[in-house]
Image (cartoon, helix red, strand yellow):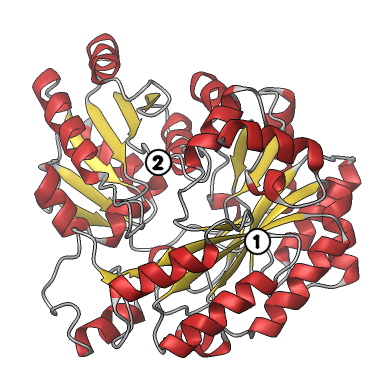
Amino acid sequence: MKVLLISSNIAQTPYSVYPLGLSMVAASLHKAGYEVRQFDFLARGRSMEALLDEIREFTPEIIGISIRNIDNVNLLHEQRYIDAVKTIVKEARDASPARIILGGSGFSIMPEAILRETGADYGIVGEGEALLVDFADKATKGDYPQDRILRSQRRLSSSEIPSAFYDSRIMDFYLQSGNVASVQTKRGCVHACTYCSYPFLEGNQLRPREAKIVVDDIETLLNKHKAKYIFFTDSLFNDDERHYLSVLKEMKRRGIVVPWTAFFKPEGFTQETLSLMKETGLKAAEIGADAPTDTTLKGLGKSFTFADVITCNDLFAEYEISTAHYFMFGCPGETRDTVLEGIENIKSLKKTVSFIFMGIRILPHTPLTKLAEIEGIISSDQDLLDPVYYIAPGIERVWLEKTLTEAFRGIRNCVFPPDALDSSLAFLHKLGYSGSLWEMLISGNAKRNRKLKNVTN
């Protein structure tokens, strides 16, 4: 039986990310003996004709479509991605009798609404590695489930989480779009941030992969695919159980030094851990502060204060590691005073770049959803497929947008709206630049700053 897996993602912010989840599902199907092919809609220039050619040539019996994001979570410049998925489903159905199955994190967060909107045959909620193999096993016998939404009954752990079946054709595109290649070290999130869907999607317990296998993946990317930059896709790299140190120690043991980046929470660092990160090639860090005041950090359910954010930022600066922070305004507990306080706090951060968002995209199965219902922002039966953003009661959208625009206008390292420099980054990647935009924005790197200035003017 032939299975065609399609990555429907068209987002490229803040950089293009290889469809890792899709390739992990492909690995499980390949191991089970199925003929599997991967198609990346973004890598093929969003060409529907290219997709139809692939379907006609490969003649799959099953078509799986991965949905990474529902929209771009940017209130000021909204982009809805489900329309692209809907078109892919329609065109694939017209071209093939194959069963069409949706999956991916974007689908799992609101499966009923997306299945209804797109008209696909089935959808998988949760990890698809085992479920899609099971679906294919039964399909070979002509046995198809009556329920259109299939839900995973358990979560994979340790060696059950497969290494990605990296596709060279797809990888070449991403290496030409910043040279960033993706690796996952664990699944799950133990934190309870009010807006975040990770605990629902991946569970609230960490499920680390074996360090040896993770580093094997890195070596595959470096040696076979000639990757020059590694992105660890974990929800948070520096977990409290310190599994990340096992990966770094294994990299050090093998003598692997490669530029890499990841998402971090701004606490728990020591000189020892930073030294190890630096030794293995940590080049840039994305810091998940999310709110710029103690009041709004508490409103988001964070375990740290803004003083911790400053300490973390200064420590990374000491080790000459480029950092980017992401801050949201309009959080639970926000007032006009905290908005003004947050602006000054962001401006006070040294040698870093801050991307500023207005409002918080409300997603199902999060504490923020319940709060939004109580405050009358959404109704209890709202499917949320069309984006709805939380802005704390008492904060007017017009006032907030004007205040943020005026506060950050002309400040090079404070980016508002958060997509303001996307076109510049895309252009630089076409020129062969590897890595993240904020590395070029941080003061002290005159050569790169001059290059960026020439591009953005």
Residues 123 and 81: in front is 81
* Point 17% across, 25% down: residue: 92
Query: Where 91 sits versus 271, above or below?
Result: above
Decide: few, some or many residues near mark 1? Use Cα within 10 Å; few <14, some 14-19, many ≥20: many
Q: Amino acid at mark 2?
A: Ala
Residue type, mark 1 in image:
Phe
Camera-side residue: 196 or 26? 196
Q: Residue at x 43, y 72 (%)?
A: 403
Query: Which residue corresponds to the image point at 58% horizontal and 40% vertical from the top-left?
Result: 163
**Label 2 residue SS:** loop
118 w.r.t. 151: above or below: above
Q: Quadrant of residue 55?
A: top left
166 left or right of 305 in image: left
Q: Nearer the viewer, residue 3 or 300?
A: 300
Is there any visible trace of residue 212 in the rendered image? yes
Circle 2 is placed at which residue position?
Answer: 11
Among numbered discs 1 and 2, the one appearing first in the sequence: 2
How far across and how far down the image is residue 150, in percent?
23, 54
